[in-house]
Image: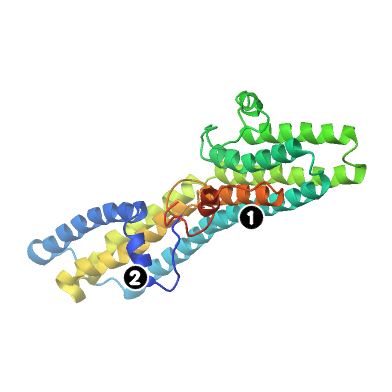
Amino acid sequence: MIIYQKNDWFKAIWHFHTGQTALSILKRLGWVFAYLVVVTIVELRFADLRLKNTPTEFLSGMGILLSLMLVFRTNTAYDRFYEGRRAWGTLVNTNRTLATYLNALLPATRHDDRLFFAKMLSNFSFALKNHLRGSRDLAELEDADGHQLSTLQHYDHLPNGIMAQVQVRKQSLYQEGLITDSQLIGIDNLLMAYLDVSGICERIKSTPIPFSYSFFIKLFILLYVGIMPFTVIDEFGYLTIPAVMAVSYVLVGLEIIGEEIQEPFGTERNNLPLNQLSRMIRLNVHEIMQLYLPPMEKDAAKPGFLIID
């Protein structure tokens, strides 16, 4: 994710135009530019194809309709992005709450249990991140007792596998008498929140914007940009090319940005910073459980550690 200073416009504009989103916009604007050059030269030198009697209200009406559709499109995409961020915010808070609870519950002499929960709760965020990105990489996960990772290899859904192991260890502590009935209910409620977060993220990922709606907006943009040079060339002449290019830049840019942020869990520059959030969860849980990480881990969890995640 791009980390930027909101008041530094020039640097933000520079970062935007060096990313994949800007390249996608420029590729499409290249086709628009070629179309405008051909249409403008043909209209001014060879054939009079201008829509002279077209009311200005027609183009204005199309622009209003298109802007309303793009606003709805962008809001829908941002709702998915923000809901994904809220889900991961819930995951951060749940980890902190449960770690605080377990730290007060487990005696200092139960070092193995404290280490197990610190590592496995941290592993959940990394496993969920990779699961949402379609990866089964176990390299970022930590082995608590020496056999957890080998057991997880049998799970297609790694976050579920981690929660299953945590539940087994929790039940073992309950049977030993370290956890009372009321404490067991509290821990169970917190553990269920992990699976709720996983379900919310999977729902966002598996429910794309309907194809017909997305396709119709693209078609409307093409029609609007295609008609515009025929209606404004009388006023602008050869300036029709930069004028329509400016309008196309805004329309195409909004559509592409909407496509990018509607999938918030990817690895693009404008997706959620899941790597940094996972590292922050690991740092928070270990600190609360009084298991301190090296300075490098702490630096990696800071928002300003990388410009691009």
The amino acid on which the numbered mark 2 sits, given as a three-letter code, is Phe
Q: Nearer the viewer, residue 53 or 276?
A: 276
Kindly give the residue lying farthest to the left in the view shown. Answer: 45
Number of labels in the image equals: 2
- In the drawing, what numbered circle is on residue 80? none
The amino acid on which the numbered mark 1 sits, given as a three-letter code, is Gly
Residue 17 screen position, x and y as percent: 32, 60
Against 286, residue 239 (above or below) is: below
Against 283, residue 167 (above or below) is: above
Residue 228 screen position, x and y as percent: 28, 65
* Residue for badge 1: 89
48 to the left or right of 290: left
Determine the residue positioned at 67% across, 51% down: 287
How far apart marks 1 and 2 lie (CA) works out to: 30 Å
Can see residue 51? no
Q: Residues within 10 Å of mark 1 (few under 14, many from 20)?
A: some
* Residue for badge 2: 10
Q: Nearer the viewer, residue 285 or 55?
A: 285
Determine the residue positioned at 35% across, 64% down: 250
